[in-house]
Image (spheres, rainbow, N blue to C red):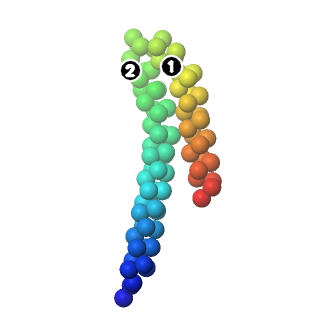
């Protein structure tokens, strides 16, 4: 039988790994979804193309910063 300390360690490990998996999954969805959403909006909303192009530069900078931080956190593991 497992002692209370062993059981608590196992529970904490499982929780930590679940959080790590959730962060990775969100990062993948963001990495794939953001460019796809922009592309679809640009194609299907011609009325707003000028606004989308104006938002593209700051959005790409923010997107690259987030990807850099995310990739560094993956490499640290």
Question: Where residue 48 sits in the image (x, y, percent)?
Answer: 41, 13
Q: Confirm or deny contact between disc 2 and disc 1 (CB under 8 A).
A: no
Q: Residues within 10 Å of mark 1 (few under 14, many from 20)?
A: few
Q: Residues within 10 Å of mark 2 (few under 14, many from 20)?
A: few
The quarter holding residue 18 reads: bottom left
Residue appearing at x 55%, y 30% in the figure:
62
SS class, disc 1: helix
| Residue on which disc 2 sits | 44
Residue appearing at x 42%, y 78% in the figure:
5
Question: Where residue 75 sits in the image (x, y, percent)?
Answer: 63, 54
Question: Where residue 54 sits in the image (x, y, percent)?
Answer: 52, 15
In this rendering, the answer to whether 55 lies above or below 23 is above
| Residue on which disc 1 sits | 55
Question: Where residue 19 sits in the image (x, y, percent)?
Answer: 44, 56
SS class, disc 2: helix
Front residue (pair 38, 77): 77
Residue appearing at x 42%, y 26% in the figure:
40
């Amino acid at each position: 039988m497992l002692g209370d300390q062993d059981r608590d360690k196992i529970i904490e490990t499982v929780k930590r790994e679940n959080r790590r998996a959730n962060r990775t999954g969100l990062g993948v969805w963001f990495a794939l979804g953001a460019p796809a959403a922009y592309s679809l909006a640009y194609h299907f909303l011609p009325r707003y193309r000028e606004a989308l192009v104006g938002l593209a530069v700051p959005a790409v900078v923010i997107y690259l910063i987030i990807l850099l931080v995310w990739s560094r956190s993956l490499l640290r593991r």
